Image: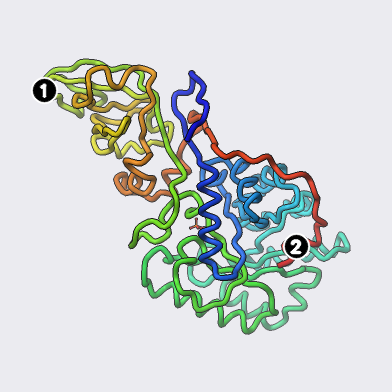
Amino acid sequence: MPVDVPADAPGVLHVDLDAIRANWRTLRDRAAGAEVAGVVKADAYGLGAERVGPALWAEGCRRFFVATLDEALRLRAVLPAADVAVLGGLTPGTEALFVDGRVTPVLNSLGEIARWRAEARARGLRLPALVHLDTGMNRLGLERAEVDALAADPAAHLDGVALRLWITHLACADEYGHPMTAAQAADFAGALTRLPPAAVSAANSSGLFRDLPVAQRLARPGAALYGINPTPEAPNPMRPVVRLSVRVLQVRRVDSAMTVGYGAAHLVRRPGRIATLAAGYADGYPRSLGGRGRIAAHGRTAPIVGRISMDLLTADVTDWPEGSPAPGDLVDLIGPHRDVDAVAAEAGTIGYEVLTALGRRWHRAHSGIVPPPPGAVARPEAAWAL
Ligand SMILES: *Cc1c(COP(=O)(O)O)cnc(C)c1O
């Protein structure tokens, strides 16, 4: 990925926007006629929503999900005509901000529906909304009794609400063959038969790779767009998106019986060289990878030794050719030698956490940048017309 890196950047998070676009196309082909939205919450999983959003738009993606209203308003600034929905729901007091920002809430309870209905009445408008039915996450969404109440008198609850989409969220889609996925899909399909007709959305990234016994109009992948494997039981069908490279600060000679780093946790057993790199747990590189991870450069890898500290980590480069690496060189922490999922597995976590933890000090270098589209502003009441 040829990108310009400022000389003073301690590390570079390369984001391949062309790969994100290719991944969106792969998911669209996989969706068998359903539309594919882009989930760009948490700043597009740490990769920069203001770059990722326009890249997805250029590929044809028109609908976006974020977690918070704040994220929605930021995305709205670069995608004036996109449909943007907030998964976290309608926090009390934010109703006017949603309407004025042309942001659509995912309504997660009858209380949220009631407040949206009141806002619509106060403005004399029909306000679009998505409604989330809980089918087993027990986190957000209407619970069973609320679905029953809604089904008993939908007109009263939804007066003034332009219902665009019923959504649910799968708990176990990443686990191949997990019975919960089919159970949730069946529960969702059952609830839908009792509710007013509207478009339907169930699948996250992994859900797109499972046979869901519910016909859906819209899929909501996030992780797979960013190269995380949606089918952990099988080879990754997605293209890698991220490369994480860090500067070498020093290379020092060490000899046996010396120790490296906090806690004197690494004991040197032979004459050799230790490279000190400009990233640590403050940058989101997991502290649990002390003594476990590997760095790479020029087709060679070297073990991380000693503890990861806040701003630094150390690797044993004794087996690399003399003079390599040199201070100022960039070496990889995530790249061809270890993808995001591999680093996550080694750290005992998931790729989602690794990506979203990457901190503010990384210089985010995007290849394949597209300019934001011009501001053809959609009418608020037309939003999410699926
Ligand atoms: C985060 C999220 C998604 C996207 O999930 P991935 O596993 O990243 O594809 C979809 N729907 C909801 C409700 C979410 O919270």
User: Residue 256's x, y, as percent?
Assistant: 11, 20
Residue 85 in view here: no
- For the residue pair 74 and 38, the one nearer the viewer reads as 38
Q: What element carries label 2?
A: helix
Relative image position of residue 179 (x, y in whole percent): 39, 75
| Tag nearer the camera, 2 or 1 | 1
Colour setup of the view: rainbow
Give the residue type that dot 2 points to. Answer: Trp
* x and y, in percent, of residue 213 in the image: 50, 79
Residue at 75% over, 62% down:
116
The crowding category of the residue bearing disc 1, from other C-alpha atoms within 10 Å (few below 14, some 14 to 19, many at least 20), is few
- Locate the C terminus and report the quarter of the image it occupies: bottom right
14 w.r.t. 168: above or below: above
Q: Name the residue under label 2.
A: 116
Please name the amino acid that badge 1 sits on. Answer: Arg
Give the number of the disc on residue 138. none
Q: Is residue 149 above or below residue 50?
A: below
C-alpha distance separating marks 2 and 1: 68 Å
Determine whether the beta carbon of the residue marked 1 sits less than 8 angstroms from the nearest atom of ligand 1: no
Label 2 CB, ligand 1: below 8 Å? no
Q: Which residue is drawn at 87% across and 59% down?
A: 123
The residue that mark 1 highlights is 270
306 and 113: which is toward the camera: 306
Secondary structure found at label 1: loop
142 up-or-down from 193: above or below:
above
Q: Position of residue 224 (x, y in %)?
A: 48, 55
